[in-house]
Amino acid sequence: MRRFFLIFIVLILCSLSCRAVVDRLVSPTETPVPAVTGQVVIPPLSGLPDTPVPQITLPPTVPGTALPTPTLQAQHDALPGTFHVRYHPDGPLFVGDQVSLEIIPGEGQEMEGQQVEVRLKETGQVLGTAGFGLYGIGRRTQATLLWIWDTASLQPGTYELVFTLQPQGTTWSETQTLLPANLAPAAQARWETVENDCCKVSFIRGSEAERDLEELLDLLDANAEEVVRLLDTDFETKIPITFLPRLVGHGGFAGQEISVSYLDRDYAGGDVEIVLMHEMVHLLDGRLENELRLQLLVEGLAVYLSGGHFKQEPLLGRSAALLPAEEGCVQAQAVISQQLRGTSQKPVCSLDRYLPLKELFDEFYFAQHEIGYLQAGALVEFMVKTWGWADFERFYRDIQSLRAPDGSERQGEPSEVVDQALQKNFNLSLNELESRFLEALEQVDLQAQWVEDVRLTVEFYDTVRRYQQLLDPSAYFLYAWLPDSQEMRERGIVADFVRRPSAPENLEIEILLVEADSALRRGDYGRVQELLEQAQAHLELAQ
């Protein structure tokens, strides 16, 4: 794989030379905890990355062929009345790229009924037109033009793109430079697909997934067998899985196929077997009969059956860390320190970060991510322990739309929908369920280790997402750039996944996050705090 990235790594090294580089509870008669299946040997983390449109015939002036040193550039929202254009692939553009655009209006602009046309000034040729709509989990207003500019026949040089709003008529232009094709990172990278018992697996040649393919295929078979057993059904057809050599979101998405980030410098951490298990649960669960799927329960089920969110973890034990602190308690950091010399007789202070279930059901993806997923998994675990798997699954598959007195479907919040299903299946309200859940959490013997681990996990992932929003926006989970992998394979496009921001500052922050994740997993909490503070200081400078 490294041979495909040689030029890129050398260039980055040149740029770096100019600066310092800094237990889960279930009824004994019900579904047991899924065992951790398969072990992938992950190599040590490295500090550097691997990392129908008309043709244009009129070449512009050819510039020099030197690849510019990458520089850190914070991504800010467009100002009112203006538009921010994001170009894909990330970083410099090269001859041969198939370029996509995201056109994001400034806050408060009304874009209903508006379209944007993009043309090349040199020829007047229209590259594409798109209307404004809602994009991503976060439902941001933007116009998305996918692979509209095929640069294969062009010469290196500067090109001016002209943007026109229709019917409004507002026009602006931006200049882009195309660098020579032979300087493009991983220019020889290609898609490959293999099959094993469970899955149809796609990856990019030269990537970490190709390097570790044998171990990954064994892990996929073991995980698929476990998910089939737990949900008592089958996939019927082979599971389509794409391994990405680039971090997108938190590392895993499931739609018609599963996409999982697999790379050495994965600054969002996460055990690959947990991520794969989580997304397999989503894929198989999504094929089973449900009228409505509520985000909290969908994600909670995947966390529960996977044994954790990003790692194996005691869901109830860690969720207890979110409760309000008791009077006279001792901070977890102090307790951990005292455990080296003696045991504190006072209770450990919890974090007071618990999210009310009504709020969490209604705005799941906009709640703090780690807290939401932890509570969701713990709630499913509590319900399975209390009523057994069979009764929980009947409830989960029986969630239906709200009905008006005349029998017609009516709109309502997810918290109203789940309240209706709880009353029907368990004869209790959402408030009563929450009271029982909180009672269970209060009975947990709170451990200082889990309090500190939860606190730092939340801080770690908040830092990851802040970094993504500022300096790696294509990876930010609410608006992640994740084009259709099947179409990318058909078109032979790899650049959207093999490139990522690689300015020295990006590398510094990502390495700090990788080290912080490693320290968190080994329980070196002081080191985690130190590394996160360093990363946050870098991000302050990038504002």
Image: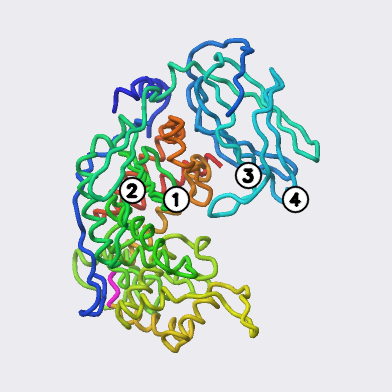
Q: Which residue is mark 3?
A: 77
Give the spatial CA distance, label 2 vs label 4.
42 Å
Quadrant showing the C terminus: top right
- The picture places residue 95, in percent across and down from the top left corner, at 51, 19
- The picture places residue 362, in percent across and down from the top left corner, at 54, 70
Q: Dominant secondary structure of the magenta stretch?
A: loop
Local SS, label 3: loop
* The residue stretch that appears in magenta: 445-449
**Amino acid type at image mark 2:** Ala
Q: Are marks 2 and 1 in contact (CB under 8 Å)?
A: yes
Local SS, label 4: loop
Q: Is residue 35 above or below residue 242?
A: below
Hey, which residue is sitting farthest front in the picture? 236
Residue located at (50% from left, 71% from top): 361
Give the spatial CA distance, label 2 vs label 1.
11 Å
Nearer to me, 512 or 265: 265
Q: Residues within 10 Å of mark 4 (few under 14, many from 20)?
A: few
Mark sitting earlier along the chain (2/4): 4
Residue 516 marker: 2
